[in-house]
Amino acid sequence: MLINDGGIEMRVTVFGATGRTGRLFIKKALLKGHEVVAFARSPEKITFQHERLTIIKGTLSDIDAIEKAVKDTDAVIELIGAVSEGTANIVAAMQKHNVRRLIALSAISHQDALDKRDFQRALINGIVKLTMPKLVKEVSKAAAIIRESELDWTLVRVPSLKDNGSSSYVKVGSYGRGEVGFQLSRADLSQFMYEQLTDQKYIRQAPAISS
């Protein structure tokens, strides 16, 4: 961890770095003075450079590359969501190198003990399970791997993602309680995940968020 007069600067590793949310997160973290390690299967998709940005090429089955990306980092942002094998490899690498903070993307389909019955959510989940059953199973398996780990994890459960701009604030809560909606901008998702780097409120919790 780096320290300067402006406060704490972290070294953050991002998996899913080339996606739209990943690129937003990286730019935000760099702007705020952090050091970023971007893990990418296709590094050329990251079209910007920065003195505090390191890009590591690898796949989610490349254990050596994952360990290289995770070693000596302060926190991991995992935006892959529905690749359980990759999630397992990331968790194992973090545990091996004593990296504790994991902020991971999950989906509306993942159930949490704080949720209540919600007709609209049930309808959305029913459609997704019917059309993309493998995706739903992978989300569930990935979330279980994270929950069963000893890491300081936060599972960020999201609905449909949009590319429109950010809101004045992000709604946070559980489904079926009238606390969150069913749309989320990628800018809001990036902002919320960034805030979790220093916020301990949702450690070992699975908040649902929306714009």
Image (tube, rainbow, N blue to C red):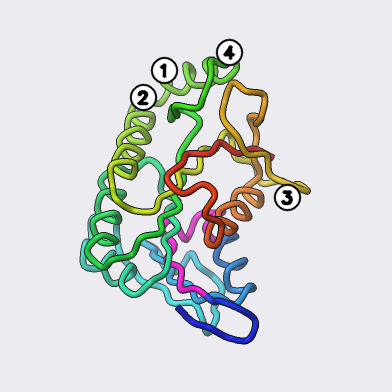
Amino acid type, label 2: Pro
- Residue 119: numbered disc: 4
Q: Quadrant of the N terminus?
A: bottom left
Please identify, in this view, whether the residue under mark 3 or under mark 2 is nearer the observer: 3
Residue tagged 3: 166
Quick one: label 4 or label 1, which is nearer the N terminus?
Answer: 4
Residue tagged 2: 133
Rendering coords of residue 116 (x, y %)? 53, 19
Label 1 crowding class (10 Å Cα cut-off): few <14, some 14-19, many 20+? few
Nearer to us in this view, 51 or 174: 174
Give the residue displayed 31% in from the left and 37% down from the top. 144
Residue tagged 1: 130
Nearer to us in this view, 143 or 116: 116
Question: Farthest residue toward the front?
Answer: 201
Quick one: label 4 or label 3, which is nearer the N terminus?
Answer: 4
Please identify, in this view, whether the residue under mark 1 or under mark 3 is nearer the observer: 3
Proximity of marks 1 and 3: CB atoms separated by less than 8 Å: no
Q: Is residue 166 magenta?
A: no
Proximity of marks 1 and 2: CB atoms separated by less than 8 Å: yes
Give the residue displayed 54% in from the left and 49% down from the top. 201
Label 2 crowding class (10 Å Cα cut-off): few <14, some 14-19, many 20+? few
Is 211 left or right of 208, judged from the image as shown?
right
Secondary element at image label 3: loop
Secondary element at image label 4: helix
Q: Tell me the CA gap for discs 4 and 3.
A: 27 Å
Is 171 left or right of 22, judged from the image as shown?
right
Quick one: label 1 or label 3, which is nearer the N terminus?
Answer: 1
Give the residue displayed 42% in from the left and 53% down from the top. 78
Please identify, in this view, whether the residue under mark 4 or under mark 3 is nearer the observer: 4
Is 211 left or right of 21, judged from the image as shown?
right
Is 23 left or right of 96, judged from the image as shown?
right
Up the image or down, 122 lies above or below 39; here it is above
